[in-house]
Amino acid sequence: MKVIVIGAGPAGCASAIQLKRFGFDVELVERNRIGGLLLNANLIENYLGFPNGITGEKFCKLMKKHISNLGINVFYGEVIKIDFNDNKFFITLANKTVTSDICIVATGTKALTLPDNIISEEAAELIYYEISKIKRQISNCNVAVLGNGDAAFDYAVSLSNRNSVKILMRGEKPKAIQTLIETCNIINNISLEKNIQLINIIRLNTKLLLNCIRNNELLNFEVDYLIVAIGRERNLPEINEKALKSDRLFLIGDVASERNIRQASIAAGKGIEVAMKVYFANRDTI
């Protein structure tokens, strides 16, 4: 039986690996790079087997190697929709359609974006919602990170190695875990601005001007880049009703988890759990 796993983060990769071990014909579809959001992580400290922690990039390289060593085929593209007809899934990408007997969706989450009406068109190219593409490319820059949760503080730590970082918090207290807060507090290149309300963003030649309000006082910050980490939401492709009702469609990882229960280890565990359910339901027909 052929299985398509959509999304190569920890949930999708773990599921594909387990299915391959069970003897399924399994393929991975990934929009960008193997690893998903973990590519942004400065340090993963709570994944079993890495007592000293491991950077997100190294962890993703290991996942990629694991997939490669097992000969699991990965093809790249964004899934537009999933249909189910004649007992088959039809998975449509921009340039082709693939079919499978079983479909596992591990497409994770996408960043909440700023309203278009506060960003000038020229400013948009200096605004990022994830840092995996730029964290090794920028240095000696002034960077603002908008947000007060784990992602914002983790992004700040990653970027502080070679840049000056200012965290712009919307409230009085951080919502990040204590370890991240303490780390940011001891890094000289990171500063914290509380109770910031962003009004608009203007492009000034090669820089951004962030116009803000704090306690009815107008403030502005001139930076080279703005990283926005104000929350995430489920990132699901279009799935038709027949597919949703099929007992051979599975949602795993962050796309299926509760808002505050998103961890790589949980995602990987759920990926393996679903793979085992698929195996026990279909082992006589593999």
Image: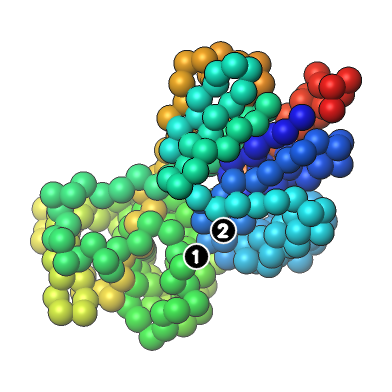
Q: Residue at x 55, y 18 (%)?
A: 85
Q: Amino acid at mark 2?
A: Arg
Where residue 249 appears, as percent x and y from the top left, is 62, 24
Q: Amino acid at mark 1?
A: Ser
The coloring applied to the image is: rainbow
Q: Disc 2 on helix, strand or loop?
A: loop
Whether residue 210 is visible: no
Where is 75 relative to 50, above or below?
above
Q: Residue at x 62, y 66 (%)?
A: 57
Q: Residue at x 60, y 52 (%)?
A: 75
Q: Residue at x 43, y 59 (%)?
A: 130
Where residue 131 appears, as percent x and y from the top left, is 45, 64
Residue beneath label 1, please? Answer: 132
Question: Would residue 209 appear left or right of 10 to someone viewing this image?
Answer: left
Where is 70 relative to 225, above or below?
above
Residue beneath label 2, please? Answer: 33
